[in-house]
Image (tube, rainbow, N blue to C red):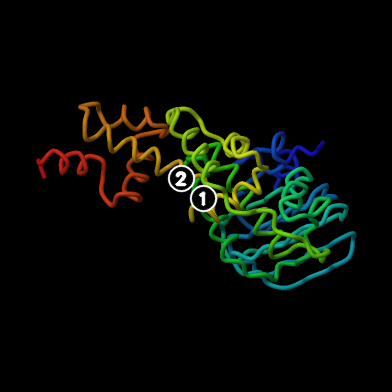
């Protein structure tokens, strides 16, 4: 994989980039965001990999040219996306309806598409079919907005969530927008109880340590994409959600039995900050850590 997605994004947008997610060397996925401040010509050049561009602002006029020919000349509504095909030279001339907006670029490399293909029973990488800004996809729109919000706040996804998001988006895109292929069998059977137990033991062994999707999948003896499907089929939740719930469970025990400061508990069970811990704790229990501690000790 010779492409550096950040350099490509900088060339396209004319602005310096910092990756929201950069798993290019390990997984074959990267996400970059650019701020739009007015009419702009995007010189995508020849796309080396399938590139998903999601526009999070209304575009009054959008001219898409591929290999020197106009392919589409029409408005684009916020949240719409296109899948750029590798090997095509792409230029976009956009006149936005607003003075400010965000463009999200997702790069899907061959290793990611090959692994997702294997999880679906395909012998080679999945190919995505051609689209030209005419698709409304709520999951992609919501994911893009959350990534941009994370960029604005400086709250980048942790390693496990970044890996999970990469595979989830790749699985979603291949499920809905893959090019026609022969019938394949879904390889993701539910996890057997002993495997689920090994995963739980692995996660609980050191909740304060970084936990990656690749490591969890290795414990299960699966590829990450197959593991995500199998884990959710077995437990009804994503691997990231499972890890969060295990960390919250450990924190609850410490809140009940120790006088440790809440920030120490948060960091000790693997949260990056007290604020992240507070949000996760409320999502799982419905109350704040401080309120939970008071209620458990009869001081409500």
* Residue 71 position by quadrant: bottom right
> Answer yes or no: do the residues labelled 2 and 1 have beta carbons within 8 Å?
yes
Q: Residue sitting at 72 percent across and 48 percent down?
A: 107
Location of the C terminus (image quadrant)? top left
Q: Is residue 5 visible?
A: yes
Residue 208 picture location, percent across and down: 43, 28
Q: Residue sitting at 80 percent across and 64 percent down?
A: 179
Q: Nearer the viewer, residue 109 or 103?
A: 109
Q: Residue sitting at 83 percent across and 47 percent down?
A: 48
* Residue 267 position by quadrant: top left
Residue 143 picture location, percent across and down: 55, 55
Asked which secondary structure carries label 2, the reply is helix
Q: Nearer the viewer, residue 175 or 195?
A: 195
Q: Nearer the viewer, residue 298 or 39?
A: 298
* Label at residue 238: 1
How many residues crowd mark 1 within 10 Å: few (<14), some (14–19), many (20+)?
many
* Label at residue 242: 2
Q: Residue sitting at 68 percent across and 72 percent down?
A: 75
Q: Nearer the viewer, residue 149 or 22?
A: 22
Asked which secondary structure carries label 1, the reply is loop
């Amino acid at each position: 994989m010779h492409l550096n997605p950040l350099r490509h994004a900088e060339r396209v947008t004319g602005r310096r980039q910092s990756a929201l997610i950069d798993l290019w060397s390990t997984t074959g996925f990267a996400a970059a965001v650019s701020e739009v401040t007015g009419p702009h010509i995007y010189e995508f050049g020849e796309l080396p990999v399938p590139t998903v561009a999601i526009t999070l602002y209304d575009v009054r006029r959008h001219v898409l040219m591929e290999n020197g020919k106009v392919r589409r000349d029409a408005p684009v509504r916020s949240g719409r996306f296109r899948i750029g095909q590798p090997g095509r030279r792409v230029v976009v001339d956009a006149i936005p309806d607003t003075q400010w907006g965000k463009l999200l670029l997702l790069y899907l490399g061959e290793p990611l598409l090959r692994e997702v293909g294997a999880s679906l029973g395909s012998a080679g990488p999945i190919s995505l079919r051609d689209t030209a800004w005419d698709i409304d996809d709520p999951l992609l729109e919501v994911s893009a907005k959350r990534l941009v919000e994370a960029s604005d706040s400086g709250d980048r996804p942790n390693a496990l969530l970044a890996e999970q998001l990469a595979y989830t988006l790749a699985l979603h895109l291949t499920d809905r927008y893959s090019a026609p292929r022969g019938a394949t069998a879904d390889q993701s059977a539910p996890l057997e109880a002993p495997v689920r137990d090994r995963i739980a033991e692995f996660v609980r062994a050191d909740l304060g340590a970084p936990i990656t999707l690749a490591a969890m999948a290795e414990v299960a003896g699966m590829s990450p994409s197959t593991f995500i499907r199998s884990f959710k089929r077995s437990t009804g939740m994503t691997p990231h959600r499972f890890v969060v719930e295990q960390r919250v469970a450990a924190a609850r025990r410490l809140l009940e039995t120790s006088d440790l400061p809440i920030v120490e508990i948060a960091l000790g069970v693997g949260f990056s900050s007290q604020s992240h811990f507070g949000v996760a704790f409320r999502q799982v229990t419905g109350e704040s850590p401080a309120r939970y501690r008071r209620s458990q000790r009869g001081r409500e």
